[in-house]
Image: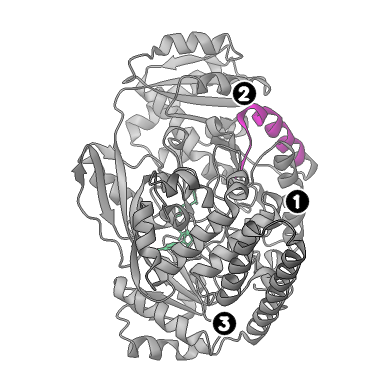
């Protein structure tokens, strides 16, 4: 539930659009100040501080005035404005939309399902107008609702794009690059099926690709096993259409300096955002570059460090591009609503080899992974001993998913592996390394030999397709299998997205095990070993009144363990409600302020998914669900 006091809303650093502009203008004076003008600089500084204070006071007043009345009029107003989609405040519907895959439960007041882009524009225009009278109004986009951090939950209006905005266009190939366009509510699995006809795929496919949408994945900047080589979703965006704060939809795509200068002269929402972002980059180039988390994956904050493809000086000389898709991807609907996406696709790699390395001594895992990375694998995935054990003990799980014949073959393979190959010892970790045989320089057997002499004594190429399938089945089942330990509990997503440098992975896993013991909680671990990225979901009983306090305590302890090992809290699941309050652990106050200025420039009336990424406004403990 949202916090009620303005102080607790974290709105302290929010400024009005006008104030941001004034501050940016005063800040821009500083670099040009000549020697001997220190006094003037101090005056400017104190003016800027006074402006900020005034803005904070203004914002507090707005927050205090927030009240829910506006929702009652909403349906009537939306219809009058021409909204064609579905509008619902039915209790059952609101209950359904109160949860996603996170540990939170927050009830929206209204759920709207736009039929098309024009409906999204109507909704944004209406909320932007009505929020002046009814300040509690906001719009939170929702797609398939599989997010793990509460990103799509709201106490105001939920705008669900997954019901109608599902169109998938055709593949076009230009200069050897294949692209396609789709609406944000298109299911990933449907896009995958369409691309397969062209022998293509979208490489950052998340493990949830069968249940999530493309729009939700882009808005979260999701990633998956092949992200080790191919990066996050943001890396595959050619362009996108986004409805911005003025209720107009704009095409957002990379721009040259000349194109940016032309855009900056306009007076549209797109131009305002481009101007503000460019100004932030001009004033803070070094700070922004230095702020990029050093881990190989990240979805924390706004990726301002990726907007320019070169240095500012080079860009102004006409090189590289200014690409706002880099911050709209992963922005969780906090700066606009995506209505269409044009994405690049990659040919499917048909000739791949799988090397499996059972690691019996925990300390070996990091070393094997570091060695394997030298051979540019497509992915390096892992699952722990508990996952393997759960797979062995729950054959029924696989029976329900595989055809009868495949099921028997997979089971035979699993038991042979355990009883004969592993002599009934369960490895601490099993590493799955996929190599691309299309690369001429690569000889899989040579890699196996190298790994064997580098802490991977039991490495071997798995030629049998059934055995390969068996290993992938276990890897993909880890999250669901963990429920089998205690069906009365829920595998809880709140520590599930931490990343550390691969050299620290073994130490991190040891720290995680120690902390799980300390709290007497079990969790099966799996993840993207090549990225030093571990997913684990402690089994907790949310009907127990003490669970929220336990969650808060565990969060601090586990996050500290990751930070102590140069880690990051947020590899691919984004900030949502759970991680937004902890961004201060990763970014300096100055960087958080830059994020806040960016968000405010793109959302001056705070109508887009407030409380996520910046300005945390949800009381984490009080918003935790009470059911499993
Ligand atoms: C079993 C399981 C496995 C998972 N595995 C992975 C994984 O491997 N990798 C990974 O990255 N994630 C994973 N996830 C998390 C989640 O599934 C992904 O992030 C997914 O891509 C979210 O898509 P969705 O359609 O469910 O989006 P939602 O959860 O509905 O929304 C995600 C975010 O995007 C915003 N949003 C939605 N639509 C729009 C729009 N049109 N415009 C602007 N903002 C919008 C929402 O407000 C929200 O903040 C997993 C989840 C589960 C349950």
Please identify the dominant SS of the magenta region.
Answer: helix
Of the two numbered discs 3 and 1 on the same chain, state the one appearing first in sequence. Answer: 3
Magenta-drawn segment:
496-515
Residue under numbered circle 2: 365
Q: Going by the image, does 486 lie left or right of 191?
A: right
Name the element at disc 3. loop
Residue closer to the observer: 154 or 272:
272
- The image shows residue 53 at horizontal and vertical percentages of 72, 75
Q: Is residue 20 visible?
A: yes
Q: Residue at x 33, y 54 (%)?
A: 239
Query: Closer to the camera: disc 3 or disc 1?
Result: 3
Residue closer to the observer: 325 or 199:
325
Residue under numbered circle 1: 556
Q: Residue at x 41, y 36 (%)?
A: 230
Q: Going by the image, does 351 lie left or right of 314?
A: left
Q: Which of the 4 image quarters holds residue 185?
A: bottom left
Q: Is residue 253 visible?
A: no
Q: Which of the 4 image quarters holds residue 384?
A: top right
Q: Is residue 507 magenta?
A: yes
Marks 2 and 1, how far apart in space? 26 Å
């Amino acid at each position: 539930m949202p916090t009620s006091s303005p102080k607790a809303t974290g709105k302290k650093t929010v400024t009005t659009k006008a104030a941001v502009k004034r501050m940016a203008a005063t800040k821009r004076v500083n670099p040009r100040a000549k020697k001997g003008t220190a006094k003037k600089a101090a005056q400017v500084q104190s003016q800027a501080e006074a402006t900020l204070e005034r803005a904070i006071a203004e914002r507090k007043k707005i927050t205090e005035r927030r009240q829910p009345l506006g929702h009652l009029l909403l349906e009537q107003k939306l219809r009058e404005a021409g909204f064609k989609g579905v509008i619902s405040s039915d209790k059952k519907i609101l209950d359904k939309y109160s949860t996603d895959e996170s540990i939170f439960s927050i009830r929206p007041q209204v759920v709207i399902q736009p039929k098309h882009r024009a409906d999204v524009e109507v909704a944004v225009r209406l909320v932007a107008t009505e929020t002046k009278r009814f300040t509690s109004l906001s719009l939170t986009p929702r797609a398939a609702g599989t997010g793990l951090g509460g990103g799509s939950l709201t106490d105001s209006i939920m705008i669900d794009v997954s019901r109608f905005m599902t169109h998938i266009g055709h593949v076009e190939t230009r200069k050897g690059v294949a692209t396609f366009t789709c609406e944000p509510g298109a299911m990933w699995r449907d896009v995958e099926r369409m691309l397969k006809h062209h022998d293509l795929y979208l490489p950052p496919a998340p493990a949830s690709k069968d249940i999530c949408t493309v729009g939700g994945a882009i808005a979260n900047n999701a990633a998956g096993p092949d992200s080790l080589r191919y990066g996050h979703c943001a890396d595959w965006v050619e362009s996108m259409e986004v409805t911005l704060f003025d209720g107009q939809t704009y095409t957002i795509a990379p721009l040259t300096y000349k194109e940016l200068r032309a855009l900056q002269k306009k007076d549209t929402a797109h131009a305002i955002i481009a101007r503000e972002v460019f100004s932030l980059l001009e004033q803070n180039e070094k700070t922004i570059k230095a702020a990029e988390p050093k881990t190989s994956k990240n979805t924390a904050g706004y990726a301002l460090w990726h907007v320019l493809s070169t240095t500012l000086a080079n860009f102004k000389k006409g090189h590289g591009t200014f690409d706002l898709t880099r911050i709209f991807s992963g922005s969780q609907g906090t700066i606009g609503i995506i209505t269409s996406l044009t994405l690049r696709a990659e040919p499917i790699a048909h000739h791949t080899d799988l090397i499996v390395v059972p690691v019996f001594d925990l300390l070996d895992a990091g070393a094997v992974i570091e060695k394997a990375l030298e051979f540019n694998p497509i992915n390096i995935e892992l699952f722990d001993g508990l996952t393997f054990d759960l797979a062995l003990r729950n054959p029924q799980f696989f029976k329900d998913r595989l055809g009868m014949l495949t099921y028997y073959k997979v089971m035979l393979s699993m038991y042979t592996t355990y009883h004969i190959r592993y002599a009934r010892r369960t490895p601490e970790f099993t590493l799955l390394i996929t190599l691309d045989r299309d690369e001429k320089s690569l000889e899989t057997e040579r890699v196996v030999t190298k790994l064997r002499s580098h802490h991977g004594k039991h490495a071997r190429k798995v030629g049998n397709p059934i055995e390969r399938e068996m290993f992938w089945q276990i890897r993909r089942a880890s999250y669901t299998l963990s429920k089998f330990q205690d069906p009365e509990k829920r595998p809880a997503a709140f520590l599930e997205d931490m990343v550390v440098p691969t050299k620290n992975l073994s130490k991190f896993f040891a720290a995680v095990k120690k902390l799980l013991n300390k709290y007497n909680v079990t969790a099966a671990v799996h993840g993207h070993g090549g990225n030093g990225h571990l997913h684990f979901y402690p089994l907790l009983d949310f009907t127990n009144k003490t669970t929220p306090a336990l969650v808060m305590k565990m969060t601090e302890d586990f996050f500290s363990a990751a930070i102590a090992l140069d880690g990051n809290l947020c590899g691919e699941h984004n900030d949502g409600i759970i991680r937004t309050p902890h961004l201060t652990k990763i970014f300096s106050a100055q960087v958080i302020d830059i994020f806040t200025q960016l968000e405010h420039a793109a959302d001056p009336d705070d109508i887009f998914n407030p409380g996520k990424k910046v300005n945390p406004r949800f009381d984490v403990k009080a918003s935790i669900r009470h059911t499993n």
